[in-house]
Amino acid sequence: MDVEASGLMHPERRILLAQRACAELYPPVLHQAALLREVGSVILLDAIREGESPDIQTPPDVRRVRVPALAAASPVLARIEKIDWLRRYVREFRRLLSSRPEVVIAFEPEAASLLLNSRFTKKGTRRVVHLHELPWRELYSQSFSGSWALRYMLKNLRRADIVIVPDQHRGRFVRSAARLDFDPMVVMNCPPRIERLPESSLIPFLRGRGIETGKIVHYQGAVGPDHGLETVVRSMRFWPPDAIFTIVGGTQPNYAEELSALAASEGVRDRVVFVGRVPYKQVAGYAAGAKVGVTLLDPTKKNWEMSAGASNKRFEYAALGIPQVTNEGVGIEELFGKTGAALVADNNDCEDVGKKISKLLEDEALSRSFSERARRLHLREFNYEYQYRKVLTAIA
C-alpha cells in the first residue's frame, strides 16, 4: 500500500528509509525522516502487523509505502500469509531500490540483508545500516527469516558505507561481531530538541479521575517484563503515602493483570494508574507534570546490557527536565549519573529504588537541580539534531 503524501518533494537527493516493522513504533525512524527531508526527498517503507495502528506520524512531504500483514482464517493460512507478507515486503523494497536512490537506510537485519545484497543495490547508492537492536543471535532465534537475515547481515556488513548504532558499547560489539575495519557511528536515541516545555496532558488526565497529588512517579514505553515495573511497584512501600505511579504505554491484558495483582498484594492498587498507549507525538504531554521518571532495564538481558544510549525514555525525561531513577549498567554512570541527570539504583533492589525515588519526591532543591541539569544536557547534546548531524554531514 503506497501512502502518497501531499506537498512538494525536495529535489536535492532521493533518500529511502526501510524497516520491516511499523515505523511509528520506532521514534528514531520518525526523527530521521523529519531531518532528512531538509536535504532531500524521503520515502519511508515499513510493514505493519495485523491490529497495529495505520496512523501516520511523519511530516506530510515524506512519502510512505506500507506493507500490511493480512488477516488469516486459520493457523495454516496464518503461516502462509506470514511468508507472503515477507515476499510482498521484499518486492516493494526491490521496486524502490530500482529507482536508484542516492541514499538508502535500512533499520534491521531483514532490510539490511536486502540492501547489502549487491544484486539488488544499484551502483552509486550510499548504503547505511542503522541497528535499533543489538545484533545478537538469540534475539532473532524465534524467526527463521530474521535469524537468516542476521547471519547474512553480519557476514556482509562491511559492504555498508555507514553503520549506525545508538550506544558506543554496542558499536564495539558490532565491530567485533561483523569484523568491521571501521567504528560504527553512534547516534543516541534522543528526542528532537524541545525549546519550550509542552503543556501537561497527564495532570488533566489524573484530575479527571479524582487524583490530585503532585507526587507523580512516571513510566513510559513498552509495558512488559525486563522494564523493572515489578521492582517499582514493590518499591512503593518506601514512597510517601500520597505518591502515585502512572504507566503510559500499551501492554498485553495478562501482563497488566499480573502487575495489578502485584500492586494489590502490596496494598497500592489504587495508586497505580494505567494510562494506556498514546501516539508518540503526545508522549511528551503525558509525561509533563510528573515529578520523577523511572527507567529501569534489566542489564543481565543481552539487549539491555549495552543500552545507555539506546533507551529513548532516559533522554525523553531529560528533555522535559524530569529527574529520573535509572538502573546500573555499562555506560549509565557516565551519561546519566555523573552528569546529574539521574540517580542510579540497583534495578533488583526495591528498597534502593524506592528510597531514591522518595528522595527526589521529597527534596525540592535536589529535584530542581536534577531537572535543570537534565534540561541543559538536552539542549546542548541530548537532542536528535545534535546526535544526527554527523550522519547528515557524511551523506551530504
Image (tube, rainbow, N blue to C red):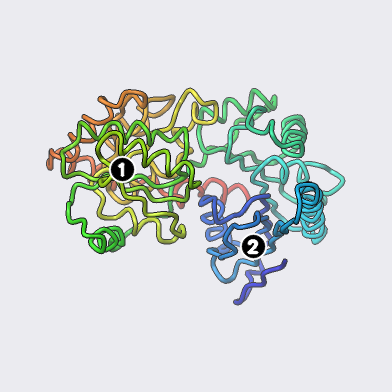
How crowded pointer 2 is (Cα within 10 Å; few <14, some 14-19, many 20+) is rated as many
> In the image, what residue occupies the spot 80% across and 51% down?
77
Q: Residue at x 67, y 69 (%)?
A: 3
Residue extending farthest to the bottom is: 7
Depth order, front residue of 334/232: 232
Q: Which mark is residue 293?
A: 1
Element marked by disc 2: strand
Residue nearer the viewer, 83 or 191: 83
Label 1 neighbourhood size at 10 Å, few (<14), some (14-19), many (20+)? many
Q: Nearer the viewer, residue 374 or 305?
A: 305
The quarter holding residue 11 reads: bottom right
Provide residue 379's location: percent of width, then percent of height: 34, 50
How many numbered marks have been drawn onto this rendered protein structure? 2
Q: Amino acid at mark 2?
A: Val
The numbered mark, 2 or 1, whose residue comes first in the sequence reads 2
Viewer-closest of 373 and 356: 356
In the rendered image, the vertical position of residue 197 relative to residue 296, given as above or below: below
Q: Extreme right residue here?
A: 119
Q: Of the residues shown, which amino acid type is indicated by label 1?
A: Gly
Task: Look at mark 2 in the image and give the residue it sits on.
Answer: 42
Q: Position of residue 178 (x, y in %)?
A: 69, 27
- Which image quarter: residue 373? top left
Residue 276 visible here: yes
Identify the secondary structure beneath mark 1.
Answer: strand
Residue 158 appearing in the image: no
- Location of residue 336 in the rendering, given as x and y in whole percent from the top left corner: 34, 34
What residue sits 41% from the left and 25% below the top? 329
